[in-house]
Amino acid sequence: MNDTDISAAAALLRGSMKTVVLTGAGISAESGIPTFRGEDGLWNRFRAEDLATLEAFREDAALVWGWYDWRRGLMSKVEANPAHKVLALWERRLPGLSIVTQNIDGLHQKAGSKSVVELHGNIWRVRCTKERTVSANTEPHLEEIPPRCPSCGALLRPDVVWFGEPLERAVLEEAVRLSATCEVMVVVGTSALVHPAASLPMAALERGARLIEINPDSTPLTRLAHLSLRGKAGAVLPLVQDRLGIGPGEDGQRSRT
Ligand code: APR
């Protein structure tokens, strides 16, 4: 990654009236949340089919909830990092910027972002398996495992999307709509292997959008990206922000010389 790339990324963002930032586990790595497929990735330590499928939940809800409770404990102790914070600033200051995330950790919102499309749900919500009602539950640790619905007594499940499950239709439609109409898409910290999230950059490219990738490693998107900034999100995004020179109080479009 060189200085020219940083300037080029800032120029693309400055000139865009519609930007989508697609994020994955990598953006939360510097907050202390393990990724899935990295060296110490969760899927190197745990079997997804035992913990993140409806079948696994039906087979052993306590085991699945035990794992999610461990992850809630971990996530309750971490803070948003500079990458999340830069995106929250850009959301306030750059026109038409939306965040589409695969992450369930809620760190974009913790950093102050408002318009976050959560493709895979959120670990701080629970859903009744009978009434399908969704409610917030932000306790670092659950009192009861598996937890039960206070109104009907049925099992609660995490309000997340498990492997083999469809994404919520409205959420996916919104993500596709934003991707298919953006001028610039910034893809941060994803291996771009899991669909349908991994197809969103294609939808953007097909409509002529410019693609910026931020990742310390190359991914299947690297050869398609107009700019591939090889580095950690917590380092790269602040560099681009410095080049953009947007202050917390200013409007990024008009006042910059
Ligand atoms: N900054 C930016 N990118 C990083 C950083 C960092 N500090 N650290 C790691 N990365 C990159 C890795 O190089 C990798 O390409 O983040 C990516 C993480 O990839 P995965 O672990 O596969 O995570 P993700 O792409 O979000 O997974 C997609 O798969 O397991 C399911 O539902 C889960 O939402 C998840 C989906």
Image (spheres, rainbow, N blue to C red):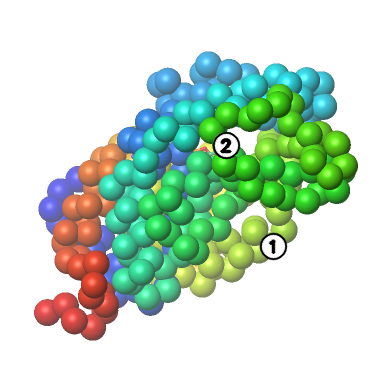
Q: Amino acid at mark 1?
A: Ala
Drawn side of residue 195 relative to residue 31, left or right: right
Which quadrant contains ligand 1?
Answer: top left
Residue 59 visible in the shown view: yes
Q: Could you give the CA–CA distance between mark 2 and mark 1, rounded to whole angstroms? A: 27 Å
Residue with the most extreme bottom position? 254
Above or below residue 101? Residue 255 is: below
Expressed as whole percent of the image width and height from the top left, the position of residue 210 reads: 38, 64
Expressed as whole percent of the image width and height from the top left, the position of residue 184 reads: 39, 66
Label 1 residue SS: helix
Residue at 74% across / 31% down in the picture? Answer: 147
User: What is the crowding at mark 1: few (fewer than 14 residues within 10 Å), some, or many (at least 20)?
Assistant: few
Foreground of the two, 191 or 63: 63
User: In the rendered image, which quarter is residue 246 located in?
Assistant: bottom left
User: What is the crowding at mark 2: few (fewer than 14 residues within 10 Å), some, or many (at least 20)?
Assistant: few
Residue at 30% across / 56% down in the picture? Answer: 86
Expressed as whole percent of the image width and height from the top left, the position of residue 110 reads: 43, 50
Q: Earlier in the sequence, mark 2 or mark 1?
A: 2
Residue at 85% across / 48% down in the picture? Answer: 131
Residue at 30% across / 67% down in the picture? Answer: 13
Q: Which residue is mark 2?
A: 139
Q: Which residue is mark 1?
A: 170
Foreground of the two, 143 or 135: 143
Above or below residue 32? Residue 127 is: below
Indicate the quadrant containing the N terminus: top left, top right, bottom left or bottom right.
top left
Label 2 residue SS: loop
